[in-house]
Image (tube, grey):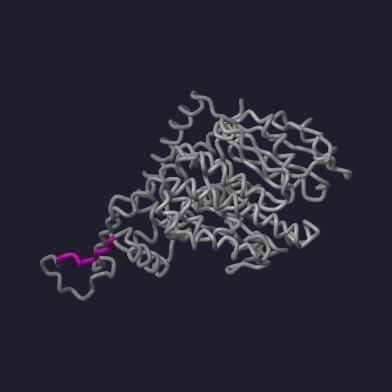
């Protein structure tokens, strides 16, 4: 049985389906089943689905008559076998580490629901969209409190930036409401949250959202139907808070709960076309030069190792609001015993001294490190004006403060994953041989460099 069941409803998606499915099959985490539900497509989508199933045993295809996205998801949930559920839409895609990060968060924090940041894509522009900034496990009431602040926000409403425990959906018979065509994701989430206890916000974007939803009025055809649907959704929302909050807390927050009607009055929580902080698609994550990756020689070897490490460090940076340079320097500081000077540390960290100084200042301002410098005492006869600059260099002392410990623990995980990727497929005998040969290489290097 697979650990994660990944569900993709498919309807006339031949132009985007390959990008979507390829992003799933290219996941770093591989213990999943992919359920493609062909919802009566009339284009080339059914053949594409069957081709993927023939090529990869993890892919299961269900062909059914057209019944809408909610019915398609329900069909897949009836057949899913995984411990967890993950959803995609066929015209979107996910980052290579998406399933790994969602599952790791659920396992490490023993959570029932993981909610993650995502990317909003418009043309060739992309922007980072997030929500909860707290880096800790949240109770049901705490999660509901955050949701109350932005009741019609996509971050809470959709299902594709979340990971669910299938045991909860099955124990309480949770499925999509096929009677409505607006906010059906949100209603499913409300019902699921009522039965979940522990929540975790993953502050790393793992999903590329490219759909542009139509307005509720255009979907329902009639204005009256639109109003009825919104009122029905609000009834779900209002009852949810009556269940989660005690009577006193509900009365205290009644106005905030009713804000949902105001916030959803525009277009059902549709994101604006362009969000602040946009950048060109492809620049949102660490880029890689394909030619260098395929190259041979010591320079290409070094490049590949550096880029692989940066790919893992980047997640730690995103989750802790750090730059990649700040994260990398924290890793170096956790490994170097005692840098004698700024020059030595800059050399060790492969940074200019100016960049090092700026990064140290930022880490110090964030409370991660404490930096002290002092000039060594002069030796007898130390008034010689011809002393080299290195001899007169300030001694550098850097202490890692308690605030840095959560980041350092994440860096330990990153290093484990880095090694797992490098040594994937090695036998124990091969690992032992590699360790012995590596030690010999390091002895040769030390002998020349010391």
Q: Main secondary structure of the magenta part?
A: strand
Q: Residue at x 28, y 53 (%)?
A: 338
Q: Position of residue 109 (x, y in %)?
A: 43, 40
Q: Position of residue 22 (x, y in %)?
A: 71, 43
Pick the residue in front: 61 or 372: 61
Instruction: State which region is magenta.
Output: 370-377
Q: Residue at x 28, y 70 (%)?
A: 389
Pick the residue in front: 172 or 37: 172
Residue 39, placed above or below residue 232: above
Q: Residue furthest bottom?
A: 385
**Can you say which quadrant of the picture contains the N terminus?**
top right
Q: Is residue 327 left or right of residue 390?
A: right
Q: Residue at x 85, y 42 (%)?
A: 41
Residue 171, placed above or below residue 196: above
Q: Is residue 408 left or right of residue 385?
A: right
Determine if the magenta segment contains residue 399. Answer: no
Residue 230, placed above or below residue 185: below
Q: Is residue 432 left or right of residue 345?
A: right
Pick the residue in front: 63 or 307: 63
């Amino acid at each position: 049985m697979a650990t994660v069941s990944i569900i993709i409803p498919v309807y006339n998606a031949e132009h985007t389906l390959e990008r979507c499915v390829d992003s799933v099959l290219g996941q770093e985490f591989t213990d999943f089943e992919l359920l493609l539900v062909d919802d009566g497509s009339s284009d080339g989508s059914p053949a594409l689905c069957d081709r993927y199933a023939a090529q990869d045993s993890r892919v299961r295809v269900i062909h059914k008559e057209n019944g809408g996205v909610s019915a398609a998801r329900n069909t897949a949930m009836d057949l899913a076998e995984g411990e967890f559920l993950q959803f995609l839409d066929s015209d979107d895609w996910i980052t290579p580490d998406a399933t790994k990060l969602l599952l790791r968060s659920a396992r490490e924090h023993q959570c029932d629901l993981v909610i993650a940041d995502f990317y909003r894509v418009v043309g060739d522009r992309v922007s980072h969209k997030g929500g909860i900034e707290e880096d800790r496990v949240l109770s049901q009431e705490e999660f509901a409190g955050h949701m109350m602040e932005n009741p019609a926000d996509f971050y809470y409403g959709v299902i594709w930036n979340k990971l669910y425990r299938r045991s909860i959906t099955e124990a309480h018979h949770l499925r999509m409401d096929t009677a409505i065509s607006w906010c059906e994701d949100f209603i499913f989430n409300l019902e699921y949250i009522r039965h979940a206890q522990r929540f975790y916000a993953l502050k790393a974007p793992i999903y590329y959202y490219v759909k542009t939803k139509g307005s509720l009025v255009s979907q329902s055809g009639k204005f009256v139907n639109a109003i009825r649907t919104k009122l029905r959704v609000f009834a779900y929302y209002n009852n949810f808070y009556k269940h989660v909050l005690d009577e006193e807390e509900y009365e205290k927050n009644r106005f905030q709960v009713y804000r949902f009607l105001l916030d959803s009055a525009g277009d059902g929580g549709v994101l604006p076309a362009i969000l602040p902080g946009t950048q060109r698609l492809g620049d949102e994550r660490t880029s890689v030069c394909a030619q260098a990756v395929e190259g041979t020689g010591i320079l290409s070897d070094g490049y590949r190792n550096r880029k692989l490490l940066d790919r893992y460090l980047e997640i730690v940076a995103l989750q802790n609001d750090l730059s990649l340079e700040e994260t990398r320097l924290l890793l170096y500081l956790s490994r170097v015993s005692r840098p004698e000077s700024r020059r030595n540390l800059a050399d060790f960290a492969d940074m200019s001294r100016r960049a090092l100084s700026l990064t140290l200042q930022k880490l110090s301002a964030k409370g991660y490190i404490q930096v002290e410098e002092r000039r060594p005492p002069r030796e007898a006869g130390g008034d010689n004006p011809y002393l080299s600059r290195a001899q007169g260099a300030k001694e550098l002392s850097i202490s890692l403060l308690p605030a840095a410990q959560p980041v350092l623990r994440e860096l330990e995980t990153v290093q484990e994953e880095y090694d797992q990727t490098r040594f994937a497929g090695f036998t124990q005998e091969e690992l032992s041989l590699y360790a012995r040969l590596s030690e010999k290489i390091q002895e040769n290097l030390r002998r020349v460099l010391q």
